[in-house]
Image (cartoon, rainbow, N blue to C red):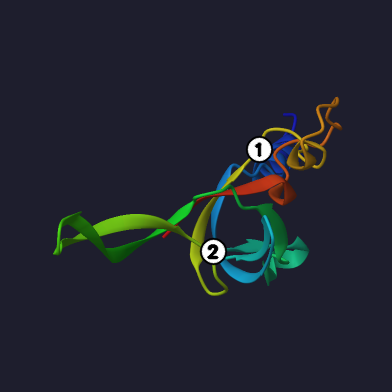
């Protein structure tokens, strides 16, 4: 009988390195990018559990909101207050949900439309989709 254990191992390895989305904690923010620590571990060779290294992810505009109370004039000497949502900054310590793009987004992050490299579903091609 033929043993196919190496095929299962190959498939398992490919699936473990196929990134689609992850939760992470923001460790630094620099403009439209953040360094994020994925909140998951992976099993390295020999069964050793290891933390992922921090990754740089893109921060889209208006991904986080806060509630503010505003006061506005409604007529002569009359005002009203109202609770509104306003855009807020992603901050260190925020827990974020990141989606991983299908292809390399290095050039796309800078608005450059070029043929992407062969890199696929790489955790470094993440975008913050929501602040939790």
Within 10 angstroms of label 1, few (less than 14), some, or many (20 or more) residues? some
The picture places residue 89, in percent across and down from the top left corner, at 52, 63
Q: Which residue does the numbered mark 1 point to in the structure image?
A: 101
Q: Please give the name of the residue rendered at 75% of the width and 35% of the height, measured from the top-left corner.
A: 120
Q: Quadrant of the C terminus?
A: bottom left
Taking depth in this image into account, of 107 and 13 the one nearest to the observer is: 107
Where in the figure is residue 54, as x and y percent of width and height? 71, 66
Image quadrant assignment for residue 34: bottom right
Q: Residue 85: percent from the left, percent from the top?
A: 33, 55
Left or right of 78, for residue 83 = right
Residue drawn at (56%, 46%), measured in percent from left and top? Answer: 21
Distance, label 1 to label 2, CA atoms, is 20 Å
Crowding near the residue tagged with mark 2, few <14, some 14–19, many ≥20 C-alpha atoms within 10 Å = many
Q: Residue at image x 24%, y 59%?
A: 72
Say above or below: 10 vs 62. above
Q: Is residue 120 above or below residue 29?
A: above
Element type at marker 1?
loop
In the rendered image, the quadrant that contains the N terminus is top right
Q: Nearer the viewer, mark 1 or mark 2?
A: 2
Q: Please tell me whether mark 2 sits on a helix, a strand or a loop.
A: loop
Residue corresponding to mark 2? 90
Mark seen at residue 50:
none
Q: In this rendering, would 106 be left or right of 48?
A: right
| In-front residue for pair 115/20 | 115
> How far across and how far down the image is residue 121, in percent?
70, 39
**Viewer-nearest residue: 78 or 83:** 78
Residue placed at 49% from the left, 65% from the top? 95
Q: Nearer the viewer, residue 80 or 40?
A: 80
Cβ atoms under marks 1 and 2 closer than 8 Å = no
């Amino acid at each position: 009988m033929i043993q196919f254990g190496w095929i299962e191992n190959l498939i398992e390895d490919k699936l473990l390195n196929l990134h689609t989305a992850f939760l992470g904690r923001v460790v630094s923010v620099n403009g439209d990018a953040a360094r994020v620590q994925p909140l998951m571990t992976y099993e390295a060779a020999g069964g050793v559990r290891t933390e992922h290294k921090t990754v740089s992810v893109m921060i889209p505009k208006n991904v986080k909101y806060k509630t503010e109370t505003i006061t506005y004039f409604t007529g002569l000497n009359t005002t009203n207050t109202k609770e509104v949502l306003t855009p807020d900054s992603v901050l260190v310590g925020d827990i974020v949900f990141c989606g991983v793009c299908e292809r390399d987004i290095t050039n796309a992050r800078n608005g450059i439309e070029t043929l992407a490299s062969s890199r696929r579903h790489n955790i470094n091609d993440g975008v913050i989709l929501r602040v939790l």
